[in-house]
Image: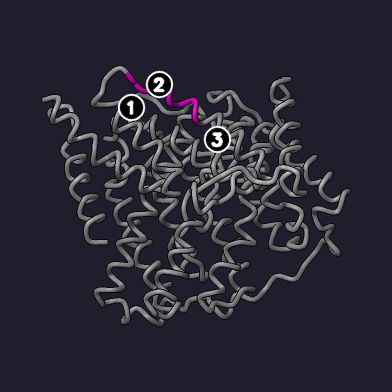
Amino acid sequence: MRHFFKFKERETNYKQETLAGITTFLSMAYILVVNPIILSQAGIDKGALFTATALSAIVGSLLIGLMANFPVGIAPSMGLNSFFTFSVVIGMGIEWQVALTGVFIAGIIFMILSLLKIREKIINVIPKDLKHAIAGGIGFFIAFIGLKNAGIVVGNEETLVSIGQLTSPGTALAVFGFIITLMMLVRGIRGGIFYGIVLTSILGMSIGLVDVPDSVVGEVPSLEPTFGVVFQHLGDIFTPEILAVIFTFLFVAFFDTAGALIAVASQAGIMKDNQIPNAGRALLADSTSGVAGAIFGTSTTASFVESSAGVAVGGRTGFTSVVISICFFFALFFSPVLGVITTEVTAPALIIVGGLMATEVKEIDWSRMEIMIPAFVTIITMPLTFSIATGIALGFILYPFAMLAKKDWKQVHPIMYALAGMFMMYFVFL
């Protein structure tokens, strides 16, 4: 087992990997609650969605761990579930069964692109500085989510955002969690992020801010309302609207996953010569989980940037992902316990992990204008547009133009020029 996961090569052990897996699971467990809430508004059975969400996470995380030896958790994408419900089903009036079939087709296309190593090729030709910008930008994005979930940053009609009410119970709990986690990390306590989540949950329950579960074991909801419905609507996808939806699923999922893999590989220190090890296998596992998720009955899956929380406590191999998969399996039966993992409880972990990832920006060559501007735009637009894919796309558009102006156009891979053109068309027509 140790040899299979390369424990010695990546300087890790069972305890470290297990702690990392549990930490990542706790950081992304909210998807089991939030995904059914969002997708049920499209008319899908909420109970079936809970089971489909868990199963897709079990399959995806297990596959990427065993196939690619990568410390990443996979589950339904938060951005794409909202797009599925509010833009496709409610906004465009497309039946959820047909929209889910679109997710299935997008997954099949992803599998083909992965098998042909097209996705891997695209990731590998991304310039080194842009990869660091993507990782750093995701750090700012994660930190912004954490600040938002904690109530420290709130919406404001005049200034877009402002500071929240720090004395409100939920925000105060998150601030406590942040301080206690920070203190443990500064003291060099391994697993400080995990222990911070646990201590914050205990405090929340003791003062009544977090509900104490009435029971530990719950019944697993039936998958019957959603399982396999995609096979009944394959003939309904050949319309301009559905094809546009499929393209959007492809675009967002591809670059969300690419960003997550780049960020995790960079943070874990396993990226070599600007290449992600086993990237092809990781992408194939990701696309396979997307197909499985659609069959189960949930929207597009993606590699979760919250995986960085596990990497921060020592996750370096696919054993972390296997542990994540096992945790999601048990979550099927212990769903009442998930109520203690609130957004305020996990917010401190996201803020701190975001800070750790943001250190990637120091690797960027800030002295060169043709690199600095595309990198900066990539970083700043991720949190400000609340989209990893948008930040990547804008960086990809600007980089070739900057290099052309510098007369260094030969240093840019032809694929980058093609992607820049595709992204410009995407923004113009979609």
Q: Which residue is mark 3?
A: 354
Q: Please tell me whether the stretch drawn in magenta is mainly helix, strand or loop.
A: helix
Type of amino acid under label 3? Gly
Vertical placement of 315 versus 198: above or below? above
The quarter in which the N terminus is drawn is top right
Pointer 3 and pointer 2: residues touching (CB < 8 Å)? no
Between the residue at mark 1 and the residue at mark 3, the CA separation in whole angstroms equals 19 Å
The quarter of the image holding the C terminus is: bottom left
Quarter of image, res 353: top right
Q: Which residues are magenta?
A: 358-366
Q: Is residue 139 above or below residue 230?
A: above
Residue at 22% x, 57% y is 428
Separation of residues labelled 3 and 2 (CA atoms): 16 Å
Q: Position of residue 203 (x, y in %)?
A: 84, 44
Q: Which residue is mark 2?
A: 363
Q: Is residue 361 magenta?
A: yes
Left or right: where does residue 358 sit relative to residue 108?
right
Within-10-Å neighbours for mark 2: few <14, some 14–19, many 20+: few
**Which scheme is used to colour this image of the protein?**
one colour
**Residue 129 circle label:** 1
On the image, the x and y values in percent for residue 289 come to 47, 57
Q: Name which quarter of the figure residue 190 lies in.
A: top right
Looking at marks 3 and 2 on the same chain, the residue that comes earlier in the sequence is marked by 3
Q: Tags 1 and 3 in contact by the CB under 8 Å rule?
A: no
- Give whichever of discs 1 and 3 has the lower sequence position: 1
Q: How many marks?
A: 3
Asked if disc 1 and disc 2 are in contact, CB closer than 8 Å, the reply is yes
Q: Amino acid at mark 1?
A: Asp
Identified by mark 2, the residue type is Glu
